Amino acid sequence: MTSLPAEAFEELLNDFEDLLLSGVRRPRAVPQAPPSPPLPGEFPAAETLAALAEAIEGCRLCPLGSGRTRAVPGEGVSRPLVLAVGEGPGQEEDLSGRPFVGPAGQYLDKWLSSVGLSRKTNCYIANTVKCRPPGNRDPVPEETQACLPYLNRQLDLLKPRFILALGRVSGQLLSGENVSLSRLRGRLLSYRGFPLLVTYHPSGVLRNPDEYRPLVWEDLKRLRDLLRSAPEAGKTGEGGE
Ligand code: SF4
């Protein structure tokens, strides 16, 4: 005699119980498999910034997801002139869920405002990784690569006129060039067809203002001039993905 599989046996028992109790066989809900989590590197198909932020807040694609207090998707207007991309959230950002809110963030706001930009009116601010690396270390390539589809999706949704990469990690990631920051800045690069400029990270400039502040000011003036002269869709420069 062949034995029934466990599911079929359970169904038979359920039907028998229905017939005994009420004389009719009740339809039963078909159990649904839980949605599978996205695979590392899988494109998050969020249609809006809010949906993308929700996906990021639930993400555990890399080890940074288990150490964070809050994920930090980004902040700003939905059709920005400039997308500024930092490295990763620090302690205050991790606690608040907002990018660049500590001293470096206030400094960045000053930089932007000096050339007529602001996250409240015409900029969006994000990071290469959306969760805080422990001890404020730089994110490692495995982490930036795992998180990159989120930044790419932000780029597709935001369609900024320019990207401003802040610091070496962001500059190298977006330019695709593994060279020093001093060799990345001062050039018009591109990433996925969007014009890209690279400058120093505000926290680095706060540590050494005499050396870096004049260079950042040059970069900001270049960005301002390019914004004034660039057509709506922007124009692509050298290098990048
Ligand atoms: S850093 Fe990015 S990839 Fe890693 S868990 Fe956070 S959102 Fe996900």
Image (cartoon, grey):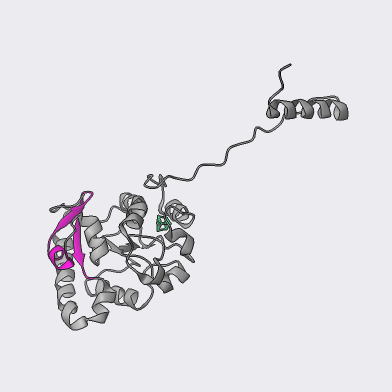
* Nearer to us in this view, 146 or 230: 146
Furthest residue toward bottom: 210
**Side of 106 where 27 appears, left or right:** right
Q: Tell me the residue at 40%/44% (across/down).
A: 45
Q: Is residue 220 above or below residue 196?
A: below
Q: Tell me the residue at 23%/65% (across/down).
A: 168
Q: Is residue 30 above or below residue 219?
A: above
Q: Is residue 156 located in the magenta-colored stretch of the structure? A: no
**Side of 236 where 45 appears, left or right:** right
Q: Where in the figure is residue 221, as x and y percent of width and height?
A: 15, 70
Is residue 146 in sight in this rendering?
yes
* Nearer to us in this view, 123 or 67: 67
Looking at the rendering, the stretch of residues picked out in magenta corresponds to 180-200
Furthest residue toward front: 1
Q: Where in the figure is residue 173, as x and y percent of width and height?
A: 25, 57
**Side of 36 where 73 appears, left or right:** left
Q: Tell me the residue at 38%/67% (across/down).
A: 89
Image quarter for ligand 1 equals bottom left
Q: Where in the figure is residue 41, as x and y percent of width and height?
A: 36, 47
What number of labels is visible? 0
Q: Where in the figure is residue 113, as x and y percent of width and height?
A: 26, 73
**Side of 89 where 225 appears, left or right:** left
Q: Tell me the residue at 64%/35% (across/down).
A: 31
* Nearer to us in this view, 193 or 15: 15
Quadrant of the rendered structure where residue 56 is?
bottom left
Q: Is residue 197 located in the magenta-colored stretch of the structure? A: yes
Is residue 113 in sight in this rendering?
no
Quadrant of the rendered structure where residue 231 is?
bottom left
Question: Which quadrant: the N terminus?
Answer: top right
